[in-house]
Amino acid sequence: MLGNSYADCHLHLPPAVSAPDFASVLEKAEIGMAFVNAAEKNGWQNVLDAAAQTRAIVPFAGIHPWQLAEHGADDLNDLEALLKENKNLHIGETGLDRAIETPLALQEEFFVRHVELAIKYKRILCVHNVRAYDRIAKILKRAGPLPAGFVLHGFSGPAEAFGEMSGLNGYFSFGARVREKKNAKIRELVAGAPRERILAETDYPCAKNPEPLPPIAAITDALGKILDLNCARTLVYENAGRLVENYGR
């Protein structure tokens, strides 16, 4: 562990921010481990360049369901080639989203391919889910346990996922909603989550609530209050560290 650092298990490289400047952002926010996701092809190399600037960055590359209109099957081949070339590169952000117009069948085609790559190359997978847990669970169950694990990003339920996804090597990453003191649903979910699989994230930069630095300290502290735990920072960091240490085995 890097001192008393935080782990931010889902964020993005802000547009027009240089790799050295982003490394400075992470340092100011006391983030010692950052799962930085590139959600479209034109950002893949940028994340790798940023990771070369600081050991804090764990780079991810994938095709987000929101970006499918700009991508084709050949781009998945390019992603595989990049994974072969970069042993420290993980996969994401990918997943399913019923709130967008892109046909779910097309989304599933791309998601399945990401899952297959995660298994083949033993890399961590970051999963986006909007009202599609049933389909995501079906695909992941069919694939079997992912050897390097996966992260259900921005987790907001359902509670049955704790048993189903833990058995497939899944982790549950909680975001800004844990700061909503009146959000009984999310507080109940956090309280019921297996502690050894709890992660925290900012999804920085967030257009809805723009902040100059990733607010990981506030989110992690909110998790600790829900869990009645003084060392939530340590819990999340160790969980994230275990996930990273085990990939590729």
Image: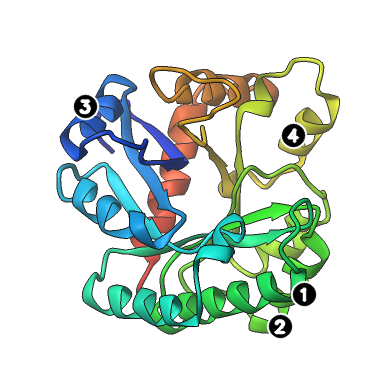
Kind of residue indicated by mark 4: Ala
Q: Which residue is mark 1?
A: 138
| Residue 190, image quadrant | top right
> In what element is the residue under mark 3?
helix
Kind of residue indicated by mark 2: Arg
Q: Is residue 249 visible?
A: no
Disc 3 to disc 4, how far (Cα)? 33 Å
> Mark 2 vs mark 4: which is more N-terminal?
2
Please state the horizontal and vertical placement of residue 219, each as a whole percent of the image: 55, 24
Disc 2 to disc 4, how far (Cα)? 28 Å
Are the residues flagged by discs 1 and 2 in contact, CB closer than 8 Å? yes
Please state the horizontal and vertical placement of residue 9, each as a whole percent of the image: 47, 43
> Mark 4 vs mark 1: which is more N-terminal?
1
Kind of residue indicated by mark 3: Ser
Are the residues flagged by discs 4 and 1 in contact, CB closer than 8 Å? no
Left or right placement of residue 83 versus residue 172 in this view: left
Q: Name the colouring of the figure.
A: rainbow
Are the residues flagged by discs 2 and 4 in contact, CB closer than 8 Å? no
Kind of residue indicated by mark 1: Lys
> Mark 3 vs mark 1: which is more N-terminal?
3
Q: Quadrant of the N terminus?
A: top left
Q: Which residue is mark 2?
A: 142
- The tally of labels here is 4
Left or right placement of residue 119 versus residue 26 in this view: right
- Rate crowding at label 4 as few (under 14), some (14 to 19) or many (20 or more) other CA atoms within 10 Å: few
| Residue 76, image quadrant | bottom left
> Mark 2 vs mark 3: which is more N-terminal?
3
| Residue 45, image quadrant | bottom left
Which of the numbered marks, if any, corresponds to residue 65?
Answer: none
Q: Which residue is mark 3?
A: 24
Q: Which residue is mark 4?
A: 191
> In what element is the residue under mark 1?
helix
